[in-house]
């Protein structure tokens, strides 16, 4: 993929209404809101599978609470070591499952690009 192609990739989101609303204000146009769904596990799996297979999606932001439903899909994507899409877990409004969220994101960046980035 050339740099010219990369600039046309979109960001997508899978989350609750609050998270998706915030991302829509930032310009995210492709999204799935999962609140109120009766079969949330299957809906999250379907949404992620659709987004992974769309060639114009470069980043998928998924609410951390939903990751448990798609661990196998995420493992498969990471195993293939594809450049896109990059799948990012967004912490929920209250708390996170990671003891040190900063360490989690530093490890994620190192795994994704191969070296540490310090800010």
Image (spheres, grey):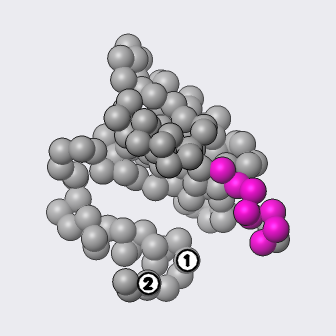
Q: Residues within 10 Å of mark 1 (few under 14, many from 20)?
A: few
- Magenta stretch bounds: 3-10
Residue in the image at 56% along x and 29% along y:
46
Q: Residue furthest top?
A: 38
Q: On the image, which quarter does residue 66 sit in?
A: top left
x and y percent of residue 37 in the render? 40, 17
Identify the residue at image location x=42%, y=69%: 108
Which secondary structure, mark 1?
helix
Question: Is 4 covered by the magenta stretch?
Answer: yes
Q: Residue furthest front?
A: 25
What residue sits 72% from the left and 43% below the top? 54
Could one spot residue 72 in this view of the protein?
Answer: no
Question: The C terminus appears in which quarter of the rendering?
Answer: bottom left
Residue topped by disc 2: 117
Check whether the beta carbons of the residues at disc 2 and disc 1 lie within 8 A of each other: yes
Q: Position of residue 14 (x, y in %)?
A: 47, 38
**Distance in Å between CA atoms under marks 2 and 1:** 9 Å
- Is residue 48 toward the left or the right of residue 34 in the image? right
Quadrant for residue 78, please give it.
Answer: bottom right
Q: Is residue 39 above or below residue 104?
A: above
The reply, left or right, for residue 116 in relation to residue 1 is left
Secondary structure found at label 2: loop
Residue 96's x, y, as percent?
22, 52
For label 1, the residue is: 113
Q: Nearer the viewer, mark 2 or mark 1?
A: 2
Q: Magenta stretch containing residue 96, yes or no? A: no
Identify the residue at image location x=18%, y=49%. 95
In the image, residue 36 sits, relative to residue 56, either above or below, namely above
Is 111 drawn above or below residue 78 in the view shown? Answer: below
Residue 61 placement, left or right of 77: left
Residue 91 - label? none
* Residue 103 in sight here: yes
């Amino acid at each position: 993929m050339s740099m010219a192609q990369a600039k046309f990739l979109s960001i997508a989101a899978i989350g609750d209404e609050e998270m998706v609303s915030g991302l829509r204000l930032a310009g995210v146009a492709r999204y799935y809101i999962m609140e109120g769904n009766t079969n949330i596990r299957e809906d999250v799996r379907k949404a992620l599978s659709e987004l992974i297979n769309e060639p114009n999606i470069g980043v998928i932001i998924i609410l951390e609470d939903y990751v448990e439903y798609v661990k196998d899909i995420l493992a498969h994507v990471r195993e293939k070591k594809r450049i896109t899409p990059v799948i990012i877990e967004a912490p929920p409004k209250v708390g996170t499952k990671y003891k040190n969220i900063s360490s989690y994101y530093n490890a994620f960046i190192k795994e994704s690009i191969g070296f540490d980035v310090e800010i």
